Every structure is written in C-alpha cells, then in structure tokens.
Image: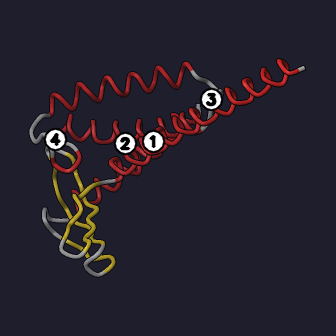
C-alpha cells in the first residue's frame, strides 16, 4: 500500500537526519543556516513536544504503540476510499515510529531544527515532529471538509424535499 511506503520514506528521512546530527555534531553545537533565524543544532529531548513530560519514556512507548496500532488498523480498513486522511495518517505514522525508535533505543529524541523569532526561540524539533504536526493538521482539514460535505448533502436533500413538497 502506498501509504505505508510514504510512512517508510518519512521514517528513513527522519532517522537519517537524526543520525547525521548525532554523529557529526557535538551536543549543543549550532550551525546558522539563515542568520539567527534558522539554526541547525544538536539537542536531546527526553519529553514530548515542547519538552513537556520529561522522562516519561514508558508513557510515550505505550501511547505510541496504541496510536500506531490504530493507524495501521484504520489504513487497512479504508482501502482506496479517501486520499487526504490516509496521507495524513501516513505522515503521523512515519513520525510516530521515528520518535518511538529513538525513545526505545536511547530514551531520548534527537532534535535539531531551531527557529528564532526575535528574542523568542521556538522549541527545537525534528523531521518526525514535523510529520506528526502536518499529519494532524491534515486530519483536522479532512474532518472539516468531511463535515462541510455532509452539510452540503443535507442541504441538497432538504432542498429536494421542499421542491417535492411544493409540487
């Protein structure tokens, strides 16, 4: 299935970039890419997004197993019916498995993408985090589009019923 291939490619990109950062940069080292705005840095995170829940590896491992199981079940159940939602789930799957492997093997995640907005530094993240955030955004978009489509169908049915009632 193409969605598993997408997840695998994203997983490999995530793991490859983390490997390069972990093996070629010292912890805390920084490489400016766009002045002080975008910096590649070597950072480790024992928590979730934005550093919350530090040191809760077992929690993350259990949650990830449940999420990955749910995604695999859903992808197998909905073969060929939609495109946006399975693509979004493939993004989440690739990212979740990427961070899962890090936590399982080392107890921490390699983060390296750092953005500064004036004096504010956005929490450092990685490719897997990006995949998860974009995937969740697409899931929300798919849900909104699905709801809007349902409203249009309801409106068409109601309009048809009104016309038939007038005849």
Give the image quarter of residue 47.
top left
Q: Are marks 4 and 2 in contact (CB under 8 Å)?
A: no
Q: Which residue is more in the foreground, 104 or 141? A: 141
Q: Secondary structure at mark 4?
A: helix
Q: Earlier in the sequence, mark 4 or mark 2?
A: 2
Q: Are marks 1 and 2 in contact (CB under 8 Å)?
A: yes
Q: CA distance from mark 4 to mark 2?
A: 17 Å
Name the disc covering residue 106, or none. Answer: 4
Name the disc covering residue 73, or none. Answer: none
Drawn side of residue 61 relative to residue 3, left or right:
left
* Residue 147, image x, y percentages: 56, 33
* Residue 78, image x, y percentages: 58, 22
What residue is shown with label 1? 91
Q: Secondary structure at mark 2?
A: helix
Q: CA distance from mark 4 to mark 1?
A: 23 Å
* Residue 33, image x, y percentages: 32, 76
Q: Earlier in the sequence, mark 4 or mark 1?
A: 1
Residue at 83% x, 25% y is 163
Crowdedness near tag 2: few (<14), some (14–19) or many (≥20) residues, C-alpha within 10 Å: many
Residue at 12% x, 34% y is 56
Q: Earlier in the sequence, mark 3 or mark 4?
A: 4
Name the disc covering residue 150, or none. Answer: 3
Q: CA distance from mark 1 to mark 2?
A: 6 Å
Mark in front: 4 vs 1: 1
Quadrant, the C terminus: top right
Residue at 76% x, 28% y is 159
What residue is shown with label 2? 95
Q: Residue furthest right?
A: 167
Q: Residue furthest bottom?
A: 35
Crowdedness near tag 4: few (<14), some (14–19) or many (≥20) residues, C-alpha within 10 Å: few
């Amino acid at each position: 299935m193409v969605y598993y291939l997408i997840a695998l490619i994203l997983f490999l990109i995530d793991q490859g970039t983390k490997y390069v950062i972990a093996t070629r940069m010292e912890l805390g080292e920084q490489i400016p890419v766009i002045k002080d705005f975008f910096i590649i840095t070597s950072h480790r995170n024992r928590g979730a997004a934005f550093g919350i829940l530090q040191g809760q590896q077992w929690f993350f491992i259990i949650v990830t197993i449940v999420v990955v199981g749910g995604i695999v079940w859903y992808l197998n159940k909905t073969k060929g019916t939609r495109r946006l939602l399975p693509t979004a789930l493939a993004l989440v799957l690739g990212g979740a498995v990427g961070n899962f492997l890090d936590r399982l093997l080392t107890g921490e995640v390699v983060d390296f993408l750092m953005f500064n907005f004036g004096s504010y530094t956005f929490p450092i993240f990685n490719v897997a985090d990006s995949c998860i955030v974009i995937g969740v955004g697409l899931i929300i978009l798919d849900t909104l589009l699905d709801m809007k489509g349902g409203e249009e169908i309801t409106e068409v049915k109601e309009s048809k019923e009104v016309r038939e009632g007038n005849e």
